[in-house]
Amino acid sequence: MADNLLFTLRNVWLGAFPLVWLGGVIAIVLLAKKAKRDPAGHKRRFIVLWCTFLVYIVGSATVTGLANGVVRQRYQRMLDTPHRAIVFYTPKRRDMVNPHDQRAFIEALRSGDDVAAHHSSPIDKLEFGFAGDRRIFSLGRDSGAPDEYWVELERSPVYGEQGTPELRHFHSPAMTAWFEHWRAKPLPRGTIRSTAQTSPR
């Protein structure tokens, strides 16, 4: 419950971004008109206005950081917990139920070294989730560097769509080997096309 409240606060806070800046522009215009009549009061009002902006920006960063921290903790717990199935949604749905295959995928996700932030982005995303959980994660190949991968929270019923938190950016030849094996593996019988969707509880 506390987690949901945190995510709701984050989404409301970030959702107010356009209104805050619109209100700031209107306030600046009104203050500029009164500047000649009351220079001292005008200065004080500008200080209050900029302090309000500062509080909003710091608050947004704080709430978003806390929410992202919760996402990362949940993701790590999912990796540590046995699952009935790991579900892959792209390009076709596959349900991974074999414990050996599950361990191989988890080990590939944990393998390699973390990469410092740089100007790049993930491509060819493979969306996956865990049976009984409605969060959808994505594993994407780095657009410019070989053997580099991104893990992100793609969709969540409580997190919303405003921003995709990065869970890991790492260099891993082991993940490349896993991908090659995964692509070569035939689809299970009865596999159906599926689009991952989440909806609020």
Image (tube, grey):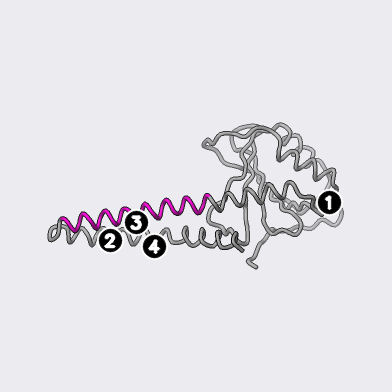
Q: Residues within 10 Å of mark 3 (few under 14, many from 20)?
A: some
Under circle 2, the secondary element is helix
Cβ atoms under marks 1 and 3 closer than 8 Å? no
Nearer the N terminus, badge 4 or badge 2?
4
User: In the rendered view, does 161 fall on the left or right side of 93?
Assistant: left
Q: Which residues are magenta?
A: 40-65
Nearer the N terminus, badge 4 or badge 1?
4
Task: Tell me the amino acid under the disc marked 1.
Answer: Val
> Is there any visible trace of residue 183 in the rendered image?
no
Q: Residue at x 54, y 52 (%)?
A: 66
Task: Tell me the amino acid under the disc marked 3.
Answer: Thr
The one of 170 and 13 positioned closer to us in this rendering? 13
- Location of residue 85 in the rendering, given as x and y in whole percent from the top left corner: 80, 53
Q: CA distance from mark 4 to mark 2?
A: 12 Å
Residue that badge 1 annotates: 97
Image quadrant where one finds the C terminus:
bottom right
Q: Residue at x 66, y 51 (%)?
A: 74
